[in-house]
Structures are given as C-alpha cells and as structure tokens.
Amino acid sequence: MLPVSERFNEKYVILFLVAISFAARLLGAGSYSLWFDEALNFRIVSNAWNVLWISNYDPTPPLYYSILKAFISPTTSELTMRLPSIIFGTLTVLVFYKICRAFFSNIDSFLASILFCLSIHQIEYSQEARAYATQLFFAVSALYYLIKIVLKQSKNLTDYFLYGLFILLALYTHNISVFYVVGFNIIFFIHVLKDNEYSKFNSWLLINSIVFLAWLPWPIATVLSGEGNSFNWLKHISFSQFILSTAKSIKVSADPDSVKPWDFIFIVAMVAGFWQAFRSKERNLLLVIFSLSFALLFCVWAVGFYKPVFMDRTIIGSTLIAYLLIAVFLSCTIKKVKIVGFGTLFIIHLIAYFNFYTERYSENEQWKQAVSKLESIGADKLLVCTQSPSWVLSYYNNSGLEIYFFKESANGFYETEATMLKKIESKESDAFQDLKRKTFQPDETLYFIDSHCSKETRAKFNNMFVLSGVDTENYRRIKIYSARMQ
C-alpha cells in the first residue's frame, strides 16, 4: 500500500496523464478524411443486433462495432466516429502507467507514460475509427492483471476474474488478441515453473477455460459463414522485412517512409534500457518483454507462412514493449542523466507529434479531398470498381453526384444510393440489393476513381472506356480519370 501522500500525488498524476493523452488524441481527429475501412463501418453497424453478432462481411469480431453503433448515424461527424478510439487510446496510457508502477517508481513511471502518451503510433490508431485502439486497451488491461497475478505471492481471485474479463473483451474486439493470449500464457507458465508457484495453476486453468468457452462461438460462426477466408490481399514478408517493419513500428518520427536521426536516439535509449534490465536481473520484467516480443511480433510474422496477418496495425503492441524498455532506461540512470535523457526524448516526441499533426502522414486515402476535386470540376457521374468505395463517397457527396459501381457477376454498372442516409435506410429495409442497372452513352462525360480495383476489373475498364488522368498523384491511392465510352 502506498503512503497517503504518494497516493494523493498519484491521483494528480493520473488526472494529468488522462488530460494530456485525451488532448493529444483529440487534436485534429475530426479534420481529416475518413478512409475506406472507416466508412465501411456504416455498412457493418447498420446491421440489426442479431446479425451484427454473427460474422457479416467483416471477419473482425463484433464488440467494437457494437460500441460504435451507439455513436453512428447518417450525419455522424468524423470526430464522433473516432471518439471511441480516442477514449480507449487515452485509457491505454493510464493502464500503461499502472503497469510501469508494478516495476518502477512513481516518477519513472510518470515520465515513461508521458512519452508513451506522445507515441505517434498510439495517437494514429487512437484517431482511427477501427478496432485497434479498443483492442489494445482491453489487452493491456489484461496484462496489468496478469502482472498482478505473477508478482503477488497470495492468490487473489479478483485479479484472475478481471484478467479473464479483459482478455475475453479483447478477443471479441479483434482476432489479433489470440497472439496476446499466447504471450500471456507464456508469461504465466514460465513464472509458475521458475518460482514454483504451482498453487496458481488451477485458478489459471479455470479462468482460461471459461474464456475459451465464452469465445468459442465467434470462431465457429466465422467459419460457418465463410468469412474466415476474407481479405487475402496480404502477402507474407521475409525475415529481413519483418525486422525492418518491426523497427518502423516503434520509431518516433511520423513519416512512415523515412528514418530521422532522432529515431536512432530512441533506439539507443531502448537498447540501453534492455541492457540495464538484463544487467540488473529484472527477471519478471524481462519475462514480460521477451514473451510479448515473441508472441506479438515473431508469432504474428511466423503465422504468415499459413495466412499472412503481419502489418503495422496488427503489431501496434510493439510500442508497449518499446516504452517499457524506455521506462527501464529512465529508472536505471542517475538523476542528471535521467533529466537529460527524458528531456531529449520529450523534445523528439514533440517534434514528431507536431510533424504528424501538420503533415498528417498516413497510408490512408484522402476521399474528402478527392470528392472536393470532383465537385470543383463539375463532375456529375462517377464510376467506381466495386460497391465498397461508394460508402465513403456517399458520406462526402453533397453535390448530387451520381455514383455507379461495376458488378462483376452481372458484368454491368449499377447506380448506388448517393447519400449516406439513403444508403443506411436501404440497408436497414433490405432494399440494399434493389439497385438499378445503368448503361452509358458514347457522348456522356463520366469520371472514374481507381481505388481498390483488382487487375481484372481495371482491365475491363480499360477496354470499355478511354481514360484520361485528371489527378492521379495527390490523394494517396486514389486516382481520378475522365472516362468516355470506347
């Protein structure tokens, strides 16, 4: 139990961390375009509750979409859609601080949490209407209670229960949580073996059995619905690419395509932290770091030999490992070195944050800007490769733009609902498939957006239309063409 004075101060520490974490994630979150996956949330959450909890279109589990359903309407702003991720991303910083407190002093935990709060990778996924920030909060919360189980000599059944609850919530938020379960079990069983804590085994087995049985309906529903084979666009990467991608996932700078000098400073601090942990024989902390690295990084890559899942989003847990090492670095240095080290890292993070905020470095498409371009040139008819991009186009369609998608099975074009309100109304009334086939005249002025086109579909467009580039460079994987019938 902490002294009263320290507990009193810690309340202010927690409030301060929550305040700056929320502000850092809120700033600018509503100012940039929805991207393809975010807009598809409208399609998914417009399902009825009984449909939402059976795999429907998206193989991601339903808990995040259930949370998002409370926030979404046809007129929902970008900021409102991203608010759940902002909230859970903020709470993740608080849990990270509590994990640090299990190993480090109040001040060292606070300093490491400030840096973690400003992590560009954490902020980016906390400003995205996807499941990753929510999943990480549940998984990190489960890790916190696992650490309490490992460090405590006596059995506290409440810790086991809360561990089970949070890992179950994580599993129902994103499938990547399976790798966290692997890592957590490695931590527990190595702890039991090295510390002879066999009395904890029965409680651990019981809670994990309950979690497994409670989670089992989801993978069964996914397999039966056929959604387990969705999204096979990822390719397995080599081991050298795995190392480079992992390094990219923890670097400080915002630009995903470059490495800055301060990235090397951050890595040096991480390596120093690892060396200090190894030298001081922090066995429990090293156990956590090695187990998480193996499960969340190596295993995610290795499973790609069967089904690739490795990408920046699926290894967001790498930042947790990186900043735990930064916490070790700060805790094992003398006061003057600590001040200089933290000051340097803090300035680096502020520069990276400012750069991220002003440049909006992201791999995501800029649909808002693309639609604005179409409006500025007076476009009134737009062609897209599939129906999926029409969701984000309808969200930004304020000028009566007619949107037509190519339907492979019918080898023809169909008009889709022009506004998000009509799209959701059609989806909810089961009129979603009653779309009108469209034929075009040779003299019609059309425009075509090349985004999420397969090679085969794009080849068909090339055969049907004469395409001339209007803007193929400025909207990140969105290319705008004028189109005339051949």
Image (cartoon, helix red, strand yellow):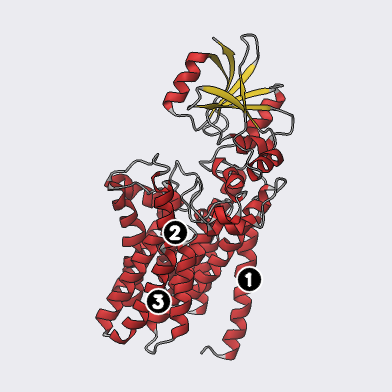
Residue density around tag 3, few if under 14, some if 14–19, many if 20 or more, within 10 Å = some
Q: Is residue 399 left or right of residue 341?
A: right
Question: On residue 218, which mark appears?
Answer: 2
- Camera sees residue 42: yes
Q: In the rendered structure, which amino acid carries the disc numbered 2?
A: Trp
Foreground residue among 86 and 224: 224
Q: Nearer the viewer, mark 2 or mark 3?
A: 2
The quadrant holding residue 151 is: bottom left
Q: Residue at x 71, y 25 (%)?
A: 376
Q: Alpha-carbon neighbours of circle 2 within 10 Å: few (<14), some, or many (≥20)?
A: many
Above or below, comparing residue 452 to residue 321 in the picture: above
Quarter holding the C terminus?
top right
Q: Earlier in the sequence, mark 1 or mark 3?
A: 1
Image coordinates of residue 164 in percent, x first then y, are 44, 73
Of callouts 2 and 3, which one flags the residue occurring earlier in the amino acid sequence? 3
Residue 327 location (% of width, % of height): 44, 69
The residue indicated by pointer 1 is 16
Query: As shown in the figure, which amino acid type bears the numbered disc 1?
Result: Phe
**From the viewer's perspective, is 177 left or right of 412?**
left
The image position of residue 426, as x and y in percent, is 66, 40
Among the two numbered marks 2 and 1 on one chain, the one whose residue lies closer to the N terminus: 1
- Label 1 or label 3, whichever lies nearer to me, is 3
Q: Amino acid at mark 3?
A: Ile
Residue designated by label 3: 207
Between residues 109 and 99, which one lies in front from this camera angle?
99
Q: Is residue 212 above or below residue 451?
A: below
The kind of secondary structure element at disc 1 is helix
The x, y position of residue 38, in whole percent, is 58, 46
* Label 2 with label 1: CB-CB less than 8 Å: no
Q: CA distance from mark 2 to mark 3?
A: 18 Å
